[in-house]
Image (cartoon, rainbow, N blue to C red):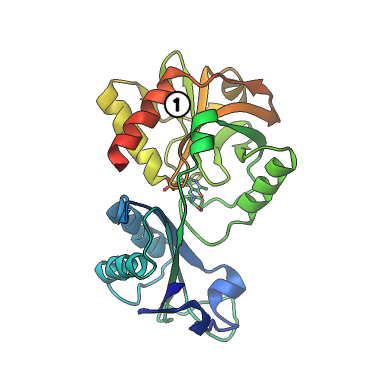
Amino acid sequence: QFVLFGNQIIERDHVSIDMEDRGYNFGDGIYEVVYIYGGEPFSLNEHFRRFEESASKLDMKLPYSIEQVKEKTAELIKANNIHNGIVYIQMTRGASPRAHLYERESASLITGFARKMDPPADAQEKGIKTYLTPDIRWLRCDIKSLNLLGNTMAKRIAADHSCGEALLHRDGICTEGSSSNLFIVKNNEVHTHPATNLILNGITRQHIIEITGEEGITVNEEPFTTEELQAADEVFISSTTMEIAPVISVEGAVQATYPIGSVTRRLQEKLKDRIK
Ligand code: PDD
């Protein structure tokens, strides 16, 4: 397996990460996950625009230009001969003697790997079960940072209840999934949390909002409650790796089951058209 380490594509075994890399000590870093379809990364520019935004929000500098990051990503995909899969790119603030205070001139370290993976056809077709749990994350969920404990803990709770995804709520307002954005459909209108500091503005989410516009479906980017989630006609989640997955049930703080409805199916289909 070939990986990206700094500005080099090298064998994974040849990588050495410093014990005091700030990503390792503080989770001081950012990342992106891009899907590769037929050897081509999907929405690469959008992902790396968000990467630059995350860096800027954390006062982090790229070690080389974003154009070069994109070129290295393309090289990485090629070196590993990926047809369908994902590429993961992260940047940490680099290594320095451990101290909370960061220096602005620190040397950021970009690393990445690519992996073969087929789209989760089963979840897309049959839907997934979800578990609703409090959103205990920090208040900058708009940054795609390496600090994911609130997300990983929620995912574990969901899995312990035999659910594929955790849905998160903050004081009764549904925010998003542990690794996805959340949508409900009521009376043929789509509702999703606005792109504030409380959610990650997913690239897939942005595609879905564009598609609703093209399809003449009303989308409300307004907060909605756990009661509205419970009373929804259809529910679905979106992410780079899931695309759109129908939600067939929610357990936990509220309980409901949902049919896989026509709005979800139409959006799934139109998103597939964009990807192909
Ligand atoms: N996660 N919200 C959260 C908290 C996420 O972690 C993700 C994606 C999304 C969807 O974003 P996008 O459509 O840009 O993938 C929303 C990625 C896939 C991950 O961490 O693996």
Q: Nearer the viewer, residue 59 or 128?
A: 128
Number of marks: 1
Q: Is residue 26 above or below residue 199?
A: below
* Quarter occupied by residue 148: bottom right
Q: Is residue 182 visible?
A: no
Residue drawn at (28%, 23%) of the image? 215
Residue projecting furthest to the right: 160
Position in image of residue 243 (x %, y %) = 43, 40
Q: Is residue 121 above or below residue 212?
A: below
Q: Which residue is mark 1?
A: 191
Position in image of residue 44 (x %, y %) = 31, 55
Queried on whether the Cβ of the residue with tag 1 lies below 8 angstroms from ligand 1, the answer reads no
* Quarter occupied by residue 258: top right
Q: Amino acid at mark 1?
A: His
Residue drawn at (35%, 21%) of the image? 218
Relative horizontal placement of residue 97, taking residue 197 as reference (left or right): right
Residue drawn at (41%, 16%) of the image? 188
Relative horizontal placement of residue 196, taking residue 217 as reference (left or right): right
Instruction: Identify the element where label 1 is drawn.
Output: strand
Relative horizontal placement of residue 34, taking residue 153 as reference (left or right): left
